[in-house]
Amino acid sequence: MANGWAQDSAVQGQIDDTVADAVLAARSRIPSGEAAKYCDLCGEDIPEARRNALPGVRTCVACQSKRDAATSRGVSTGAAARIASCAEFIAGVSDLWRGCET
């Protein structure tokens, strides 16, 4: 089926290129190299089993789950990390404030 002035194979070529680009983008997000011993976001230990299973892993399961959930809602991973950091900061300030009241 031709689309306007495009040749029949042109549409399939665009589809193939789009899929190839998506695969390359997904592969670029897969961590590689040496895994971190501590989570880059919260500082908690990353279990050895997780580090062995996912070479290059940089986050604990809890933080990665938060990032995945935020990404699926359309929030960038950087924004998700900042939101998590802000929430931890606010919780810490609240704890300090409660300590000053007594």
Image: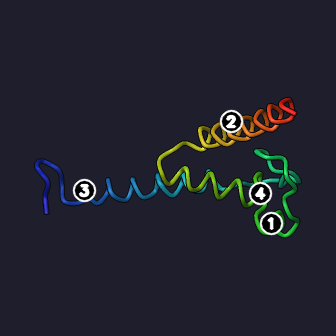
Q: Residue furthest front?
A: 102
Mark 1: give few (<14), some (14-19) or many (20+) Cα within 10 Å: some
User: Foreground residue, 48 or 87?
Assistant: 87
| C-beta proximity under 8 Å, tags 3 and 4 | no
How many residues crowd around disc 3 within 10 Å: few (fewer than 14), some, or many (20 or more)? some
**For mark 3, what is the residue?**
11
- Does the CB distance between marks 3 and 2 fall below 8 Å? no
Query: Where's residue 76, x and y in %?
Result: 55, 42
Q: Name the kind of residue labelled 2 in the image.
A: Cys
Residue under label 4: 60
Amino acid type, residue under disc 3 in the picture: Val
Q: Secondary structure at mark 1?
A: helix
Residue corresponding to mark 1: 50
- In primary-sequence order, the first of circles 4 and 2 is 4
* Whole-number angstrom distance, CA of label 4 to CA of label 2: 18 Å
Give how far across and how far down residue 10 sits, in percent: 25, 54
